[in-house]
Structure formats: C-alpha cells, structure tokens
Amino acid sequence: MDTAPGPAPSLFTDRYELTMVAAALADGTADRDCVFEVFARRLPHGRRYGVLAGTGRLLEALPSFRFGDQEITALREQGLTDERLLDWLAGFRFSGDIEGYAEGDLFFPGSPVLTVRAPFAEGVLLETLALSILNHDSAIASAAARMIAAACERPCIEMGSRRTHEHAAVAAARAAHMVGFASTSNLEAGRRYGVPTTGTSAHAFTLLHDDEKAAFRAQVDVLGPGTTLLVDTYDVDQGIRTAVEVAGTGLGGIRLDSGDLPTLATHARELLDSLGATGTRIVVTSDLDEYAIAGLMAAPVDRYGVGTSLVTGSGAPTAGMVYKLVERAGVKVAKKSEGKRSVGGRKYAVRRHDGDGIALAEVVSSEPIQPRDGDRDLVVALVEAGQVCSTASPVQALAEARAHHERARAALPQEAWALSRGEPALDTVTA
C-alpha cells in the first residue's frame, strides 16, 4: 500500500503567497527590499501578558524550507503551472535577516515579536509557517505560564498528547517545558528537545488484571516501590491501602484522576499518613486548568498533571498574531483598515523598568529609542543573510529559552500574576 509522503516545510504555506510571488515576479516587484513584522493586536480577553514561544522551531524549519522535485510536482498537481514561478521556487533559499524577541520573553499588544527583512518574494513565503508556529506555541506557553503561577512551585506534568494532533503534541510539550513544566508524557518531545518524560499506568492496566492488588504488584515489580500507583479505579480508600500493602511505606506516589479532588486529596493524605506512608506524593489529574489548580492550593497535592485544558483552543486561546508588511524599499507602509490598523516601519522595542527591576512599560517605536536607565533591549538578531545566528542544539535552545523566560517573568509587576481577568500588565507605549 502506498503511503503519503512526509510533510515538506515549504508546503506549510497558503496558496495565495505563491500567487503573490508569481505576480511580483511578472511585474518586477519581487526583489523589492521589504520588512515584515509579526505582532498581536491584542491579547486574548482578560489575559495580562503573552509568552513568545516557537521561535526555536521556526529557526529549525528555515534551512529545510526548500522546493525540491517532490514539492514542485505537488504544486503542478494543484494547478500552479507558472514556469517562471516554479523555476524561482526551485532555486529558493532564504537570504534575508530575521530579528525579534528572544524566545521565552513576554509580549503585549503591538510588541514586534518577529521582524523579517528580505526581498518581497522571500519574505512573503514565510508568513504562514511563521504564524502557524508562533500562534500555536505562544498560545500553549501563555496558558502553561498561568498554570505554573497557580501551582506556586508545585511541579506540573504536561500530558495532553492524546487530545491534539501528533505533531502539535510535541510542540505543546516543548512550549510547556519552556515556561516551567517539569516533565511531559510525550516521548518524542523527550528525544527531540530533552524534555524529561514520565508516566506509569492508566486504568486499563488495573482492569487488565484479576484484581487491583495484582496490577499494583506487577507495576511495582517492574518499576520499583518509588512508582506512582493509580488508586481510583474502584474505591480510593481500598486502593490506597492496597498500594501501601504492595509497595510498602516507601511508595513513591498515588494518582487521583476523578472525583472531588480537594476532598479526596485531603482524605488521601490523612490515610497515607496513618499507614506510615508519610513521604508518598499525591498527584492529581482530570482536566485541570489554572483555576482548578488554584482551587487545590489548600489541598495536600504534590504534583499536577495537565492535558486537555493546555493543548486545546478553549484553554490556550491564540493571541491572533499577524504578519504585516511595514516597509518597502525604505518607505514605511501601514494598513489603515478600521480595527486592523498597523504602524509603518521596522520597529525598535525596549522594556522599561523601575529602580527595583520591575517592568513598567513596553516602548515600541519605528525610530531608535533613546535609552534610559533600566531599559532592556528586546529585539535580538536571529538570522543574518539567510544563516541562523545561534549554533545551539534544539535541546540547548530550549534550555536557554526556559532560563530567559524565568528572568522575564521575575520582572513582572505583582498584578500580572492574577488569574482574574484584567488589562495587560504593561502598557505598550508608541514612542
């Protein structure tokens, strides 16, 4: 049986980008030096800040953004037969410059998170790839950061792979780890990005055996007493007693996946302590989001497993980033449409801080910004003359983004940490 070919990064592209290139090649404007900018006009309703994620994945994809024989054939089959266009695509190599916010940084309405300077034809081709990666990963990272804040240093585990597309699952695990999630259930995220992986068993494993004790014994025999046993398949109390009987008081953890979690966790802690398993951790799962996590803060929970609410649109809404032409041949250009206005010109951006290092405002301008004490330049070079600036491996790049995010979040004002709906934590000032 024939199998479908693997995805080509260059075909993660909307057709209208190729038709624009064809027309620009025909009228001689394809080589005009242009500047494209990625920004969000607004944050999702009530969000205090966004977290930029996906820049590393975009830079990974850029070198392989090519149109080889298979891609050209696929375009012909879809009715794109302009020979001048196809010849140009066959020789395409991105030769421009890309700059933007460091991955892991925070963004606010109008923040120029990515800027592409290149001939029109080259720059416009990257629109869909850039937006699909940055919108998705930033939505996950922004939601995950709220969960990390709600957890107050208790570890969070990303386990949403079964609720999203298989490739999105890897990206989601990466983005969640970048903002502080301790581990993931996704093995490919572990292989590709070095995210620590974890996982023990599901209810199916308990139901496979003749009784709960046999299931626990099999798991402990393979993984040792430090494993985490799922105790709510039948009766939680009996499950905890059986778990301690099998693994001993050194049992690593129990997992609760249903029911009234605050009440169950409190009762489970009391029962574990009475059985001498005072060091056994309590892990809770079951459709947690940042509000549910906050509601468990008074309960004796040690770790949270988060899935659906992290990787789906309802829990991780996109900021609706856009990719707009802001300059052509040195001339600033801007869109004037009502509700979708843009500001022309390549942008400069700094984050202004007070004497204690707390962020005060995001300053964005199409002219160089006169620096003040406490200003931090936000825009860094990412690609120069088509070459990615960083030589870090995907694992190293993620570690650097995680560290950068920690520093950026540490400078947020106190109100930014609130889970309640409110205005962006920082105003974007157009200088």
Image (cartoon, helix red, strand yellow):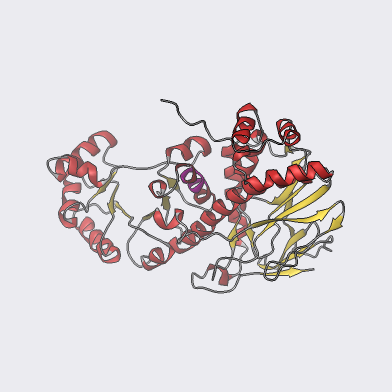
Please state the horizontal and vertical placement of residue 169, each as a whole percent of the image.
46, 45
Judge by depth and name the residue closer to the eye, 160 or 96. Answer: 96
Helix, strand or loop for the magenta stretch, by majority = helix
The residue at the point 74 percent across, 38 percent down is 94
How many badges with numbers are in the image?
0
- Looking at the rendered image, the quarter that the C terminus falls into is bottom right
- Looking at the rendered image, the quarter that the N terminus falls into is top left
Please state the horizontal and vertical placement of residue 48, each as a whole percent of the image.
57, 68
Residue 339 placement, left or right of 312: right
The residue at the point 73 percent across, 37 percent down is 85
Residue 35 placement, left or right of 41: right
Judge by depth and name the residue closer to the eye, 134 or 378. Answer: 134
Q: Quadrant of residue 202?
A: top left
The residue at the point 73 percent across, 33 percent down is 83
Residue 85 placement, left or right of 239: right
The residue at the point 45 percent across, 55 percent down is 312
User: Which residue ends up furthest to the left in the rendered image?
Assistant: 210
Q: Is residue 91 above or below residue 397?
A: above
Q: Quadrant of residue 118?
A: top right
Q: Quadrant of residue 391?
A: top right
The part of the chain drawn in magenta is 169-174
Q: Is residue 422 above or below residue 112?
A: below
Residue 252 placement, left or right of 165: left
Judge by depth and name the residue closer to the eye, 202 or 249. Answer: 202
Is residue 90 a member of the stretch shown in magenta? no
Please state the horizontal and vertical placement of residue 12, each as a whole percent of the image.
59, 42
Please state the horizontal and vertical placement of residue 418, each as a whole percent of the image.
51, 70
Residue 378 seen in render:
yes
